[in-house]
Each structure stands twice: as C-alpha cells, then as structure tokens.
Amino acid sequence: MTRTDRPAGFPPPGPYAFSAADPRGPSSSGPAAGAPFLVTGDVARPVTLTVAGLRSRWRQHEARVVFECGTKGPQRHTFSGPLLREVLAAAGPTFDPARRKDRSRYVVAVQGRDGHGTVLSWAEIDEDFGNVPMLLATSLDGMELDAAGSQLVVPSDWCGARYVSAISRVWVGDWQGPLSAPGGG
Ligand SMILES: Nc1nc2c(c(=O)[nH]1)N[C@H]1C(S)=C(S)[C@@H](COP(=O)(O)O)O[C@H]1N2
Ligand SMILES: [Mo]
C-alpha cells in the first residue's frame, strides 16, 4: 500500500479550486437514456435524474481537485457539474429551510452501482455551515459521464473514498429517521 502524507494545511479553508463555468446547453445528443439515479428520502419531490438532466437543468461548475487513493496514490482531476446542494434543494428536503438548526439534522447518503457508498451531512454542503462546493459531476477530465453515471466530487476531502462514481441513488433524510422509523423512507 502506498501512502502519501496529507499536505500541511489540507484541506484549505476555502474557497476551493472551483469556478462557475458557462452553463452548458442541453445535450444535443438525443434522449437522455444513460445512467439514471434516484434522489429519494425525506424529500417532497423524489426524482430520477440523468447526467444529461444534471447538465441541462443546473448551472455547471468546475472543480480542479487532488485526492489520495490508498492504492493508487495522489490523483488529479478536473470535474464539472452542478452543485450537490442545488440539486438536492430542488428535490425539497423536508426540513424547514429557514431554520439552520433543522437543516443541521439532515444527512445525505450517496450510493454507487457497485455498492460502494458514503454519507455526508447536509451541513457540510450548506452555505451557513461547511459550505463545501460538492458537485454531482457530469464530466471528468473532459469526458462526459452520461454512460458511466455521475460522480460525487468532494473538494474538501484528502482521501478519495467519498468520490463515489456511477451514482445510483442519493438519499436525504433526518438522521433520526433510520432510528425512529425502521424501514421508512
Ligand atoms: N462507485 C465507486 N466509487 C468509488 C470507489 C468505488 O470503489 N466504487 N472508490 C473510491 C476511491 S477509494 C477512490 S480513491 C476514488 C478513485 O477515483 P479514480 O479512480 O477516478 O482516481 O474513487 C472512489 N469512488
Ligand atoms: Mo481509493
């Protein structure tokens, strides 16, 4: 196993290497067939999204990132895609958006088609808390992800494990949900 020391001062306090790119127009490559994933959980409007939908419905941002893979060493990539918080906000999490304390109780679970998955807290992406510009990538190093599926981009992470690729499901919910309502959601 290779191991690269986390650089001093990582993660940077922000702003992260991140810029708003020109919004791309809807894909001209025909119907959005590839790699749909579900946004579900404690949301008012559960939705199935595709990479083409992520590209056409939200402003695209670019993130140049470096992260370490435990087996492959440091990886540098340029991703583009919408902000995770904007996509999830459109699904309507059931918290009271005016109450920061309410928002702070929510978690987000991201699952890949191979079963790898991770959790984050809503507060990590919330502008009033961690304000991390996580993306749901639509492209990776210039390659469109329509066939492969979207990938979670976590510019604040040194470890690559949360960069979940081939996303199949994103679940948003009250952290108490799984405890108080087993099987629910
Ligand atoms: N779906 C899925 N995503 C995943 C993984 C995985 O096993 N499955 N591995 C993670 C790990 S450990 C790392 S380091 C990065 C590697 O990304 P790269 O191969 O594009 O550099 O992907 C992450 N995303
Ligand atoms: Mo990794």
Image (tube, helix red, strand yellow):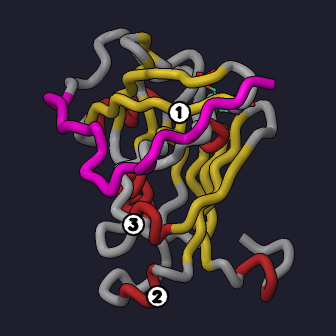
Residue type indicated by callout 2 = Asp
Q: Quadrant of the N terminus?
A: top right
For ligand 2, the image quadrant comes to: top right
The image shows residue 19 at horizontal and vertical percentages of: 20, 37
The image shows residue 57 at horizontal and vertical percentages of: 29, 40
From the Cβ of disc 3, is ligand 1 less than 8 Å away?
Answer: no
Query: Dot 2 lies on which element?
Result: helix
- Judging by the rendered image, the residue that carries numbered circle 1 is 67
**Residue 161 quadrant:** top right
Disc number lying in front (3 or 2):
3
From the Cβ of disc 1, is ligand 1 less than 8 Å away?
Answer: yes
The dominant secondary structure in magenta is loop
**Among the two numbered marks 2 and 1 on one chain, the one whose residue lies closer to the N terminus:** 1
Residue name at image x 59 percent, y 26 percent: 35
- Judging by the rendered image, the residue that carries numbered circle 2 is 102
Left/right of residue 68 with respect to residue 70 in the rendered view: left
Disc number lying in front (2 or 1):
1
Front residue of this view, candidates 35 and 15 = 15
Residue name at image x 59 percent, y 19 percent: 148
Q: CA distance from mark 3 to mark 2?
A: 15 Å
**Residue 23 quadrant:** top left
Question: Can you say whether 22 is above or below 170 in the image?
Answer: above
Q: Is residue 116 magenta?
A: no
Q: Which residues, given as a range, are shown in magenta?
A: 1-23
- Judging by the rendered image, the residue that carries numbered circle 3 is 130
Numbered-mark total: 3
The image shows residue 52 at horizontal and vertical percentages of: 40, 26
